[in-house]
Amino acid sequence: MLYKEYGKTGLKVSRLGMGGMRFEEPYKTEKMAEVLIRAYELGINFFDTAPSYCEDQSEIIYGYAFRQMQKPRNSFVVCSKTMADNPKEIREACMRSLDRLGLDYIDIYYVWCLVHPEDLPKRKKNGVLDGFRQLKEEGLIKHICVSTHLEHGKIAEMLDQGEGLFEGILIGLNAVNFSLRYPGAVEAHKRGMGVVTMNSLGGGIITQYPERFSFLIREGDKSILDAAIRFNLSLPEITVALVGFRNVQDVDSAVESVKRFQQMKMEEIELLQKHIAEVQHDFCTQCGYCEEGCPAEIPIVRLMDSYNYRLLFGPEKAMDHLKWHWWTEDIREIVSKCTQCRQCEEECTQSLPILDRFKQLCEDYEKMKKK
């Protein structure tokens, strides 16, 4: 197993981390605990979970596994999260997680799910940072970190609002959305933060559709999994790549991929991105120029990101991406604000028909709603 320092915390963590959102049989606690135990035995010491994961069973599975392991507490790192925005509810959430995990403290506790630029300022007004500070002072959590889905251009401002408290960041990054996410990872790394990637396999998309991502494969790779993991771990700013394990076999496969890891040069990564743009010439490269000056402040990049999923996998996957990744239930509410000025299309470096894509996504939503 490969290991790396997590920012400035002094923690030495496995570069492959376990995500706790994919257990295939979440109500079979003992069986699913074997997944975590196997991961630990193979050298993984970074374990990420959260309330509500896997029908609210993930933390329970983790807690059972930790009790079975009976290993020194400093031999593994546990991450959990809360979306609570005031000290009282933050404390309640933390104590509940500690109870389920069977631990005295949580190593990394995330201010969870910052999706919109206004999310952190709103939570700060309710005392979110004070609540986290108090937990840290009491030793209930060791490190305050942040989990976000914000785009590249909005990460720096969000981190500035963190008052220097954030020691690490959890950000969705993979070979599909590299252009959208990588600058945010670079910004966090510049500040000395640990950088962990969620959705390292594109939420399973990359491994489910290997034929579409065969261009990632290099000599020595035995599967698309090797290529996807190598892509993330080759980025110098990345500390840990999380992979959600469904079962013990998933653990074994991912660990074997790490054993075969061959560092890619940045030039190779940039060539891959150019290849994606060439192969998917209709792909939005998510540069963000379209959003600058939009009179309706429409999150165009997010909608085009979801349209990329439509191009790759069809309308249903695009709607899922909007709902579960961007937390957008009804796209029509957003698009209805569009003034039809077409400034975004004038700024688009690829001359994409952005308004037509808005219309298509709305039609897709209406069709899905009728099913």
Image (spheres, rainbow, N blue to C red):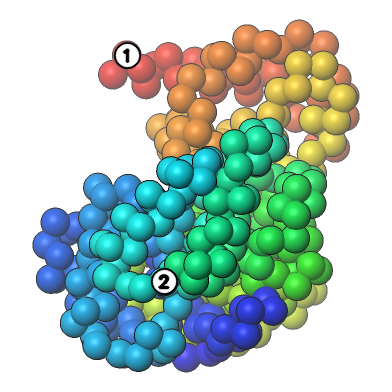
Residue at image location 14% in from the left, 56% down from the top:
27
Residue hosting label 2 = 105
Q: Quadrant of residue 370?
A: top left
Whether residue 43 can be seen here:
yes
Q: Position of residue 183 (x, y in %)?
A: 76, 57
CA neighbours of label 1 inside 10 A, class few (<14), some (14 to 19), many (20+): few
Q: Residue at x 70, y 45 (%)?
A: 151
Q: What residue is shown at x 75% (from left), y 54% (from top)? A: 163
Q: Position of residue 172 (x, y in %)?
A: 57, 55
Mark 2 crowdedness (10 Å alpha carbons): few <14, some 14-19, many ≥20:
many
Figure check: 338 above or below 208: above
Identified by mark 1, the residue type is: Lys
Residue at x 24% of width, y 85% of height: 69
Q: Secondary structure at mark 1?
A: helix
> Residue 67, position in %: x, y?
21, 79
The answer to which image quadrant residue 62 occupies is: bottom left
Could you say whether the residue bearing mark 2 is in a helix, strand or loop? loop
Vertically, is 357 above or below 125? above
Q: Give the side of residue 12 with respect to residue 1, left or right.
A: right
Give residue 370's mark.
1
- Residue flagged by tag 2: what amino acid is it? Tyr
Q: Is residue 73 above or below residue 364?
A: below
Q: Quadrant of residue 311?
A: top right
Q: Quadrant of the C terminus?
A: top left
